[in-house]
Image (cartoon, rainbow, N blue to C red):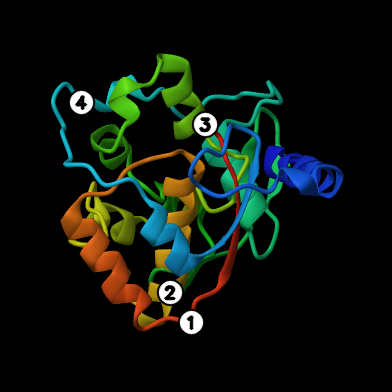
Amino acid sequence: MGMRIRAAIIAAVAVAATSSLSAPVAGAAPGETVETTVWQAIADLPRADEDRTGYTRDKFRHWVDADRDGCNTRAEVLIEEATTPPRVEGRCTLTGGTWHSYYDKKDHDQAGALDIDHMVPLAEAWDSGASQWTPKQRQDYANDLGDARALVAVTAAENRAKGDRDPAEWEPSDDEADCRYLADWVAVKTRWGLSADNAEIDALEGLASECVDEPMTVERAR
């Protein structure tokens, strides 16, 4: 069973058992469940200027094999997001399978055509508060299988066009993806207690004005 399936089951049980722990974003502790909406979550994001001083990608150790089943984080995401499951052989060699990249509405039958995108890029996370985290917290962020919105399999060219950009600088090439992208971005920032600068907030609010205000449930990671 993949880590993301196990995480989803655990999270569902936890929410059912601790529904009284639903909390507003402000003051929510790790493990608490935030019940909000996309628009409210945007309003609740802490505001702060971004600072990339000291950032290097290797400060976020990623694609680890946290459960030691032979499949690293990249493979776990590919397995969980496959629209047709791949065969998993040997030390997690994936054969076959199909995937849908929602950023550009393209289907792929080769895992190598996909990148695993950090919804909120590592550099953006650093700028928004992760520079103050421990190495373990940054590793947990870079390999977050506890929320399916944190990591997403997408067409490699889309991921590379996005790079370290936030929604003030980049949107998916498929306009129909914008509302999901907005909600996923805000959910990850909420989950990890990350801040947003003024340009980012303006962009998020602009996107939100074109989207229905959907309910959002987020389990706080920190």
- Work out how far the residue at label 2 is from the one at label 3, CA to CA, in angstroms: 25 Å
Say above or below: 222 vs 218: above
Look at the image and tell me in which quarter the N terminus lies. top right
The reply to whether discs 2 and 3 touch (Cβ–Cβ < 8 Å) is no
State which tag comes first along the sequence, 2 or 3.
2
> Under tag 4, what secondary structure?
loop
Q: Amino acid at mark 1?
A: Val
State which tag comes first along the sequence, 4 or 3.
4
Give the x, y percent position of residue 184: 47, 59
Q: Amino acid at mark 2?
A: Cys
State which tag comes first along the sequence, 4 or 2.
4
Q: Amino acid at mark 3?
A: Arg
Residue that numbered label 4 is attached to: 55
Give the x, y percent position of residue 132: 32, 21
Residue 179: which numbered mark, if any?
2
- Work out how far the residue at label 1 is from the one at label 2, CA to CA, in angstroms: 8 Å
Q: Residues within 10 Å of mark 3 (few under 14, many from 20)?
A: some
The reply to whether discs 1 and 2 touch (Cβ–Cβ < 8 Å) is yes
**Nearer the camera: disc 1 or disc 2:** 1
Residue 212: which numbered mark, if any?
1
**Nearer the camera: disc 2 or disc 3:** 3
Q: Residues within 10 Å of mark 1 (few under 14, many from 20)?
A: few
- Work out how far the residue at label 4 is from the one at label 1, CA to CA, in angstroms: 36 Å
Residue that numbered label 3 is attached to: 222
